[in-house]
Image (tube, helix red, strand yellow):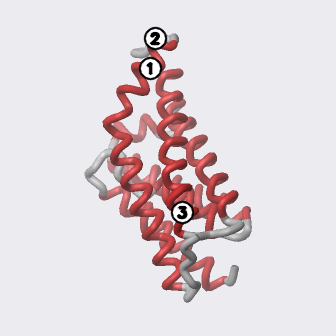
């Protein structure tokens, strides 16, 4: 990966994370796509991890500055599970990086949305006192998260495909379909 490509991809990811701060829709944001595409497109793993998590953390810090309730979330137990989910999504991207294609972006996006849903809701079940620590409590927690899943999966697909297309155009790389 050339320095120009690193700069272009880094800027795209940071701009998307900044856009998240302005997004009024719950769970419709580019964060999962940033993690997936960071893993998929950065060829050096250290860049994938540092730039992706740097962008994600910057967005969270900016949100906490603008919203006092968000600042209590920052670095909480729930926050930890969200970042574990992003790490898993980044790893999915790294696995898919061996053959970047639209098909892999679509499949990876669907898998990323499911992984995020399962890990983040599991974290909520573990740490929120409102859910009993039983199978029924876990089921209730997962069911409570379902209304947010539509925004997660929709944004994951739209932003991942958008990042892939924009990166391909900006770097003059051929878009691969399969």
Q: Position of residue 60 (x, y in %)?
A: 46, 50
Q: Nearer the viewer, residue 171 or 71?
A: 171
Q: Nearer the viewer, residue 29 or 19?
A: 29
Secondary structure of the residue carrying numbered label 2: loop
> In the rendered view, would you say 119 is above or below 48?
above
Q: Quadrant of residue 46?
A: bottom right
Q: Position of residue 67 (x, y in %)?
A: 33, 45
- Give whichever of discs 1 and 2 has the lower sequence position: 2
- Which residue lies most toward the front here? 178
Q: Which residue is mark 1?
A: 139
Residue at point 54% right, 79% down? Answer: 175
- Give the distance between the C-alpha atoms of the residues marked 2 and 3, in whole angstroms: 37 Å
Q: Residues within 10 Å of mark 1 (few under 14, many from 20)?
A: some
The quarter of the image holding the N terminus is bottom right
- Which residue lies most toward the bottom here? 172
Q: Residues within 10 Å of mark 3 (few under 14, many from 20)?
A: many
- Give the distance between the C-alpha atoms of the residues marked 1 and 3, in whole angstroms: 29 Å
Secondary structure of the residue carrying numbered label 1: helix
- Give the distance between the C-alpha atoms of the residues marked 1 and 2, in whole angstroms: 10 Å
Label placed on residue 49: none
Q: Position of residue 124 (x, y in %)?
A: 47, 27
The quarter of the image holding the C terminus is bottom right
Q: Position of residue 171 (x, y in %)?
A: 56, 85
Residue at point 39% right, 15% down? Answer: 130
Secondary structure of the residue carrying numbered label 3: helix
Q: Which residue is mark 3?
A: 105
Q: Quadrant of residue 99?
A: bottom right
- Asked if disc 1 and disc 3 are in contact, CB closer than 8 Å, the reply is no
- Give whichever of discs 2 and 3 has the lower sequence position: 3
Q: Which residue is mark 2?
A: 132
Residue at point 63% right, 61% down? Answer: 39
* Front position among marks 2 and 3: 3
């Amino acid at each position: 990966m050339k320095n120009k490509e690193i700069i272009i991809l880094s800027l795209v990811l940071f701009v998307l994370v900044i856009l998240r701060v302005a997004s009024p829709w719950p769970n419709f944001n580019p964060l999962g796509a940033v993690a997936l595409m960071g893993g998929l497109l950065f060829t050096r793993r250290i860049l994938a991890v540092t730039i992706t998590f740097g962008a994600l953390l910057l967005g969270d810090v900016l949100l906490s500055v603008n919203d006092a309730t968000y600042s209590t979330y920052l670095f909480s137990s729930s926050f930890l599970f969200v970042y574990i989910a992003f790490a898993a999504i980044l790893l999915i991207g790294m696995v898919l990086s061996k053959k970047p294609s639209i098909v892999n972006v679509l499949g990876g996006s669907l898998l990323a949305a499911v992984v995020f849903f399962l890990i983040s809701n599991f974290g909520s079940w573990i740490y929120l006192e409102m859910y009993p620590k039983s199978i029924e409590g876990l089921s209730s927690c997962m069911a409570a998260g379902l209304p947010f899943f539509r925004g997660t999966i929709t944004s994951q697909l739209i932003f991942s495909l958008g990042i892939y297309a924009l990166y391909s155009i900006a770097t003059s790389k051929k878009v691969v379909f399969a």
